[in-house]
Image (tube, rainbow, N blue to C red):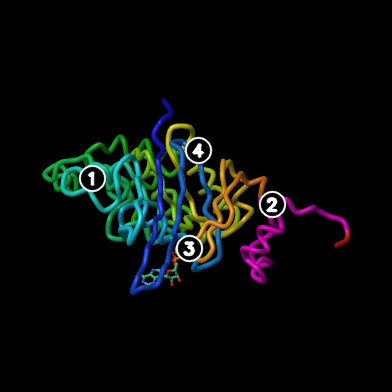
Amino acid sequence: MTAAPAVELRGLQVQVDGRRLLGPLDLRVEAGEKVALIGPSGAGKTTLLRLLAGLRWPSAGEARVLGALVGQLHGRALRDWRRRIGFLHQQDNLVPQLRVAHNVLIGRLGAWSLPKALWSMLRPQELDRAAAALADVELQPRLWSLPGELSGGEQQRVAIARLLVQEPELVLADEPASALDQRLAGDVVDRLVRFASTRRTLLVSLHALPLLDRGFDRVIALRDGRVVHDGPPSSLDRGVLGALYGASLDWLGEPIGSEGGGAP
Ligand SMILES: Nc1ncnc2c1ncn2[C@@H]1O[C@H](COP(=O)(O)OP(=O)(O)O)[C@@H](O)[C@H]1O
Ligand SMILES: [Mg+2]
């Protein structure tokens, strides 16, 4: 028996006011796959990731994520399902009034009872867990800092520490590195890929093509809400990228598969 896929979309569409933002999409992502999602601004990357996180429902067709149909879970089952999915945003990931320790422990909230969660605001629960996660992202000394005292790259690492303590099966990240310079962006994507390792499924939307070279198994390109390319990173060439990004290609850095050096 083959394992159930992490994500399975069938005839999926998302519409707002009669306008189709996404689909129809048929897509299967196996458990453990590392997928980069690319495409020009407005292609539907955020809409797709939010749908997979259950923050948006299908207008037609179906989306099965970790075995459940998006939009059909309620109550306890919905909360249990959400705990298994981690979401990393582009920025503004942290609660500015909360110290780093508390921000990291937000990743545990889904696993805690309400009294334990409230008590943790006074006396942080499972502090050793938060400290270990921060050590993993090399930020242990910042346990009691406020987010505003950290750089953008450090804040993104705190958000990754929060994912570490949540231990989600499916990690969704929406342009998690687009507010960072190239070196820090590479670091954040490396950490996500490493965290996902073999057991977890990862879908990351990316703004910069050089970041595809960070251990992804598969690249899915969206345009106008449809999949226009799906294959390993090595399958992307100038033809695909030109069709995808057109004139904006120059903004994206040196594409994969381009022949370095030499005259044009
Ligand atoms: N809540 C919404 N209401 C109406 N249109 C939306 C909404 N969210 C996104 N869109 C539109 O859907 C399309 C896809 O957007 P988005 O998923 O944000 O693309 P991407 O993340 O690839 O830039 C865009 O045309 C955008 O303007
Ligand atoms: Mg987006």
Q: On the picture, is 129 further left or further right than 114?
A: right
Q: Residue at x 48, y 57 (%)?
A: 175
Label 1, label 2: how far apart the Cα atoms are? 40 Å
Q: Label 3 amino acid? A: Gly
The x and y percentages for residue 111 are 22, 39
**For the residues bearing labels 4 and 1, Cβ distance under 8 angstroms:** no
The image quarter in which residue 150 lies: bottom left
Q: Where the N terminus falls, by quadrant?
A: top left
Q: Nearer the viewer, residue 30 or 210?
A: 30
Instruction: Point out the stretch of residues depicted in magenta.
Output: 236-262
Image quarter for residue 166?
A: top left
Disc 2 crowd, CA 10 A, few/some/many (<14, 14-19, 20+): some
Q: CA distance from mark 4 to mark 3?
A: 29 Å
Q: Earlier in the sequence, mark 4 or mark 3?
A: 4
The circle on residue 109 is 1
Amino acid type of disc 4? Arg
Q: Earlier in the sequence, mark 4 or mark 2?
A: 4
Alpha carbons under labels 1 and 3: distance apart: 34 Å
List x then y, in percent, for residue 213.
Answer: 63, 46
Which disc is residue 78 wearing?
none
Tag 4 residue: 194
Ligand 1, by image quadrant, is bottom left
In which quadrant is the C terminus drawn?
bottom right
Disc 1 secondary structure class: helix
Q: CA distance from mark 3 to mark 2?
A: 23 Å
Q: Are marks 1 and 2 in contact (CB under 8 Å)?
A: no
Above or below, 88 relative to 31: below
Mark 4 or 1, nearer chain start: 1
Q: Residue 256, which numbered label?
A: 2
Note whether ligand 1 is within 8 Å of mark 3: yes
State the SS at label 4. Answer: helix
Q: How many marks?
A: 4
